[in-house]
Image: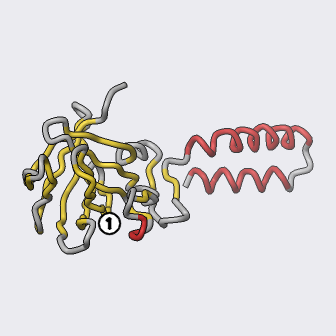
Amino acid sequence: MAFKLTLIGIFAMIFSENKRNMKHLFILLSFICIALPSMASEVNDCESGNVVSKIDSSVFVGRIENDEYQVYIVMDFYRKNITCPRQEIFGQNPGYFGAVRDTRKWIIEDSNIKGNMAYLVIINDYGSEDLEAKLTFNPHDGTYTLERTEGSTIKIVVNRQWVKIPKKLVFKRRTK
């Protein structure tokens, strides 16, 4: 509403012949040009069509790790432009789940962000197993909790033996 009133005021000043009003118009337009980009709270990502909030657009981007199982997630749930190493046939995806001691990857096929949660569809690198999971960002301590909601159990190989990843797993960003 206030923006519409400002536009009406601008047009009224443009059609006014008073030089003083023209000075005010110039100052007002300068202010709008400077303030408008910083007032934008959302950005529309043209590639994926997602609306991304500037405030939290780095929450679901990057690499997070779990030291106990030596696993990690590489993600960009906003642009969905991650290519999984040695799995280029899947194209660009929101990310992947990998293990330090295993070359196999679980590809994050789809992601939907709602607040501090991302709902994920994950498949193994053969496409024979899939699951749905929820990745929650905990702003109080900066950790992420991955919780399998339905489907297959994620398994990795450690010392030539299958190890099942628990239904709920906590990740954190590596500090440098």
- Numbered marks: total: 1
Please name the residue shown 29% across and 41% down the image: 64
Left or right of residue 63: residue 10:
right
Q: Does 128 sit above or below residue 172? A: below
Label 1 sits on residue: 110
Q: Is residue 56 left or right of residue 101?
A: right
Q: Nearer the viewer, residue 21 or 85?
A: 85
Percent position (x, y) of residue 5?
A: 63, 53
Who is closer to the viewer here, 29 or 45? 45
User: Where is 170 relative to 165, above or below?
Assistant: above
> Can residue 167 be seen here?
no
Task: Report the quarter where the C terminus lies.
Answer: top left
Percent of width and height locating residue 170: 16, 41
Dividing the picture into quarters, in which one does residue 29 lie? top right
- In the image, residue 169 sits, relative to residue 43, either above or below, namely above
Disc 1 secondary structure class:
strand
